[in-house]
Image: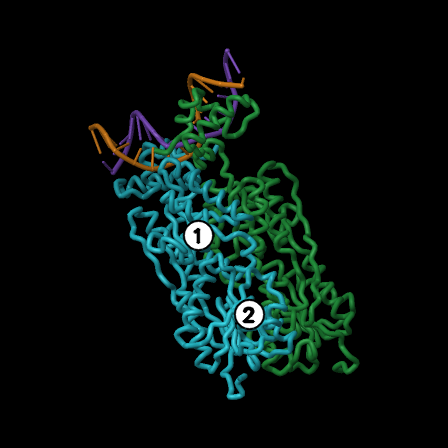
Chain colours: A cyan, B green, C orange, D purple
Amino acid sequence: MAVTIIDVAREANVSPSTVSRVISDSPRISERTKRKVRQVMDRLNYHPNFQARNLAAKSTKTIGVIMSHSTSLAFQNPFFPEVIRGICTSAHSNKYGMYLSTGGTEEEIYQEVVSMVQSKKVDGIILLYSKMNDRTLAFLKEADFPFTMVGRPYQYEDEITYIDNDNRKIAYELVNYLVNLGHKQIAFIGGNLEYIVSLDRLEGFKSALKDMRLQYIEEYIIHHHNQVTNDIDSIRKLMNLEVPPTALIAHDDSVAYEIIRHLEALSIRVPDDISIISFNNHALSAFVKPPLTTVDISIFQLGLEAANYLFEKICNTQAPIKNRFIPTTLIERQSTKALRNETIK
Amino acid sequence: MAVTIIDVAREANVSPSTVSRVISDSPRISERTKRKVRQVMDRLNYHPNFQARNLAAKSTKTIGVIMSHSTSLAFQNPFFPEVIRGICTSAHSNKYGMYLSTGGTEEEIYQEVVSMVQSKKVDGIILLYSKMNDRTLAFLKEADFPFTMVGRPYQYEDEITYIDNDNRKIAYELVNYLVNLGHKQIAFIGGNLEYIVSLDRLEGFKSALKDMRLQYIEEYIIHHHNQVTNDIDSIRKLMNLEVPPTALIAHDDSVAYEIIRHLEALSIRVPDDISIISFNNHALSAFVKPPLTTVDISIFQLGLEAANYLFEKICNTQAPIKNRFIPTTLIERQSTKALRNETIK
DNA sequence: CTGAAAGCGCTTACAG
DNA sequence: CTGAAAGCGCTTACAG
C-alpha cells in the first residue's frame, strides 16, 4: 500500500540501506546516487515512516510539554500560548515535534508523564510549572529522564535544569519602587503557595520590607488560591483595617483587575486612593482602566530557553545542570501614584 | 536494555503473542493467564513500546492540532487554552495523545501538516481556524485524510465536518439587541476578512441592517486586520463623521478594550456616549471598565466536539459528514445602554 | 484459549 | 561509496 524504502530501492537500483542513508543525507553516499534516489522518491511520492524510523533509531523526535492541572490552567491563560510559542520555535529548529499534555487532575498528569517516559513516547519533557512535593518531578528526577522546568524547583535546585524569572528579586524591586513613591503601607495579594513562583514573590516582598525597615503586617498578606475564590470580602477587610494599605502588589494582572473592580465597588479609586502594581503583563493590561503598571516576565523567552536547555540534555546526557533567570521589565503605566503629603497617619 | 514482550513471555512461560494479547486485554485470553502475565509485567516493570505498537498496528494513537499562524495567535490568546482543554478532554477519553503544531508562517504550517500526514505521525487532524484559499485545507481534503475544523469552511461546506458558532445569526442578533435599545447608527469593527469567522459576522451584521431597514453606511465598517494595526485614527475618523454611530459591534473583546481606550482619549464615554458589544467573552471582560457586554462562544465545547467528530471519523472512515453550531450566550454587562430621546439627529 | 511465523518500515554495525 | 543481514518491539492472520 504505502510506498516504502524497498520500493524506492528497487526502482533506483540500489539497496534499502542506501535509500536509508539518502533519507538522512549521510555524507557517505555520493551526490550522484543521492540525486538518483531522490528523483525516484519524488516520482513515487515516497515519505519515510516516522514511527518506523524512530523505532529503528531508538529516538522519538518528540518532546513532551506538561501543563499544570486545569484548575490553574484558567489562571495561566495568557501564559500558555506564549510559552508554547517559545517552545515551538526551539523545537522547530531542532526538527522536533511536541506532544502536549493537559491532564485534568494532578494524578492524571502524573500518569501521563509516567506513560510518556515508560512507553518511550518522547525524548524529553518540559514541566511548565514548579510546585511543592510534586510526584511528577520526583519521578522524572528518579528516572533520570531528560527534562527541564519553567520555574525554580523547590528542592535540588542545583541538580535540576530550569529557567525562571528571578521572582524574589522582582518582588523586592517592586516594594522598592513603591517605597520610592512614598508608600509605606504595602499589601501583598499572593498566589497559591504550593507553587514556587508564589513563594518566591512572597519571600522577595518580605525581605524588602525588612531591608527597608517597614513593618511586616500579617493582615496585609492575602493568599489568592485561585481566581474564583477571591472575593470582595477579603478586600473589604483589608481596606477597613485601622491603617489600610496605600499600595498593593498583586500576583498576576488578572488578580489586579479583579481587585480593582472590588475596590471600585467600595468607592476606592486606583491610583488616587491606592496604588496597584502587579506581575505578568497580560496583553490586555494596557487597555484596562487604569492601565496597569506590571512586570513583563518574557514568557516567550522562558519557553524558548527551557526548550533549548532540554535539547542540550537530549543531545548529551552528560550536559551540565544549568539554570538561568530571564530578565524582566517593569512596564510603568497608570495604576501607581506617588503618595502625597496627606499620607494616612 | 529495555524489557520487552519477549522477556515477559519467557518469564511467564507463554508466547509473545499471548503477552501482546494481554496488553490489549483481548477477550480470547483466559483470566488466569492474564493474571499470571500481568504479575510478570509488574515484576519486570514492563511497559509496551508506543512506537513499536503503533508501527505494527498501523495506527498512531495521536491527533494533530493545527493553529493558525502566529500573527493571529496573539489575537487568539484566550481562545487557545480553552479549545485545547476541550480537545484534550476528548482525546483523553479516547486514549489518544495530541501533537501540536504552531508553525511560524502559513507555509510552515502547510509543510508541517503535509509531513504529519505523509509520514504518518497522526491518525487525524483538527484545524483550529478556517480561512479562504487555504492550501492546508485543500491538501487534507484532497488526501482524504481524517480531519475536522473549528470554523465553517468557505467552500465544500457539505463535504467537510466542522464545528462552529452560528456567527451570522449571532451578529444578526447583536444588531437586533442594539436596535431594541433604540440604536440606529451601528458601526462594525470586524476582523481579518481572510478568516471565515470575520466574513460570517459581517454578513450577519449586513443582513440584519437590511431586515431592520437601517441604512448601510460604508464608513461604519472598519476591518481590524490584527491587533497591532488598529489605531486611534480610524476611531477618530469614525466618531468625526457627520452622523457618528451610537453603538458599535466589535469582533473580539480585546478589540473592544482597545477601542474603549481610544474613545476615552477622545473623551467619548462608554456606554453613556456610545454602546459597545462584542464577541468571545474573555475571562477578563467582567473586570474591565466598563464590564463588557459580549457573546460567550463556548470555546471548550468547540474543541470538545471537534475532537469527538474527529474520533468518529478515525474509527469509521465512512462516518457521515457532520457539522454543528455550538450555542452561544449573550452576557449582558455594562457596556451598552438604551439610547435616550436626546438621540443625535 | 494459545503459539509459530510473518510482517510493520525503517537503521546501523559489519564487511568489502 | 555501497550492500546483506540483523534488529528495533510490537501485532495479527493462520492454525490448532
Position of residue B312 measured from the top left corner of the image (x, y, whole percent)? 61, 40
- Foreground of the two, A218 or A81: A218
- Foreground of the two, A211 or A312: A211
Residue type at numbered disc 1: Leu
- Foreground of the two, B96 or B225: B96
Position of residue D10 measured from the top left corner of the image (x, y, whole percent)? 45, 30
On residue A256, the disc is 2
Residue in the image at 39% along x and 74% along y: A211
Work out whether residue B121 can be spotted.
yes
Work out whether residue A335 can be spotted.
no
Q: Is residue A81 above or below residue B220?
A: above
* Subunit under mark 1: A
Disc 1 with disc 2 on a shared chain: yes
Quadrant in the picture for residue A7 = top left
Quadrant in the picture for residue B258 = bottom right
Residue at image mark 1: A127
- Distance from Cα at disc 1 to Cα at disc 2: 26 Å
Callout 1 secondary element: strand
Position of residue A280 measured from the top left corner of the image (x, y, whole percent)? 48, 66
* Subunit under mark 2: A
Question: Looking at the image, is mark 1 or mark 2 earlier in the sequence?
Answer: 1
Q: Quadrant where the C terminus of chain B lies?
A: bottom right
Residue in the image at 70% along x and 54% along y: B327
Q: Quadrant where the N terminus of chain B lies?
A: top left
Position of residue B53 measured from the top left corner of the image (x, y, whole percent)? 46, 33
Residue type at numbered disc 2: Ala
Callout 2 secondary element: helix
The residue most toward the bottom is A341
